[in-house]
Image (spheres, rainbow, N blue to C red):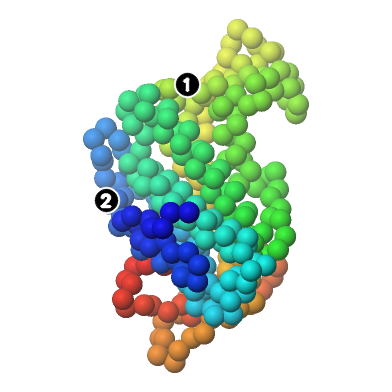
Amino acid sequence: MPSDRGQRGEFRLGQELLRIPRQKKHGRPGRKYGSRTALDAKHMDQILAVQSNIYDQFHGSNAGREHFFKADHAEAYAAYYTVMYLIQDTGESIQSHMKRGFSSDPWLAYIEFWGVMQAIVIQQDAIKELYEAVIGSKLQITKESDWSKIRDVRNLCAGHPAKRANGVPATQRTFMGRRFGHYNQIHYELWDARAPKQPSHPAFNLSAMIKAYDAEGAQTLNTVLCALATKWPKAVSPSDTRGAHVEDTSTSGFSIVINLTDEADDAGSR
């Protein structure tokens, strides 16, 4: 593994811990960057916020750190610090791109679209790994969830499977061209064997789908956070006056209030 993260912050192995400063905001919401039109809505805020709280909870608990530093828990600790980076990197990158919008150059926009979609899949896989490392069981995702829907639409735009037949009235083929639209309206072409000479061009709101997924992903991370706080409570000094209410909105049915310290020498970091 690399010994540092360049300008992003420190990456230290062994008994040393992660400390990743939060990046500066990329301009103001609604600002235009050349031909790109930014979105006013904030996305990935919920996932990034809970990820930050997980970081603070982990680093505030001596018992938790000692648990993961044991030799037989080395794999779980490796899973923790790698997926924490993946969740942050993908979340901040998607957030930044959504503020800028897709390029007016169709070739660049095409690559950007698939980069965004793949980043979401990478983030989802990282959240699943973090859940398994802390909870000890695999995360169960329903087919009806917003989490699954955004993966399904990615496969749909990629034309996968190439010849769709299961679950549809007739054979279908799909693909997405270079001039597909923008975050609020992504178009793709759908060929249906029932009307072979009349392909349709359905659309979906990727911005709304990411926002819905952000809420679900944050809920899963909240489950992880509550499990950490329950297993390894954070040691809080009497001088700490600020706190954060963290509620587990999953089906496990409990909530926890923990205090998160505010380190003066690391303002804005996790």
Picture coordinates of residue 227, whole percent (x, y): 63, 71
In the foreground, 82 or 146: 82
Query: Could you tell me the amino acid type at mark 2?
Result: Gly
In the foreground, 74 or 223: 74
User: How many neighbours does mark 2 have within 10 angstroms: few (below 14), some (14-19), or many (20 or more)?
Assistant: few
What residue did someone put label 2 on? 27
What residue did someone put label 1 on? 177
Q: Quadrant of the C terminus?
A: bottom left
In the foreground, 4 or 173: 4
**Disc number placed over residue 217 in the picture, else none:** none
Residue positioned most to the left: 34
Q: Residue at x 66, y 73 (%)?
A: 254
The relative height of residue 220 versus residue 146 in the rendered view (above or below) is: below
Q: Residue at x 41, y 22 (%)?
A: 179
How much space separates mark 2 and mark 1, taking CA atoms? 30 Å
Does any portion of residue 123 appear in the rendered image?
A: yes
In the foreground, 85 or 176: 85
Dots 2 and 1: beta carbons under 8 Å? no
Q: Residue at x 51, y 38 (%)?
A: 117
For this view, does 175 lie left or right of residue 163? Answer: left
- SS for tag 1? loop
For this view, does 125 lie left or right of residue 205? Answer: right
Does any portion of residue 221 appear in the rendered image?
A: no
Picture coordinates of residue 34, whole percent (x, y): 23, 35
Choose top left, top right, bottom left or bottom right for residue 153. top right
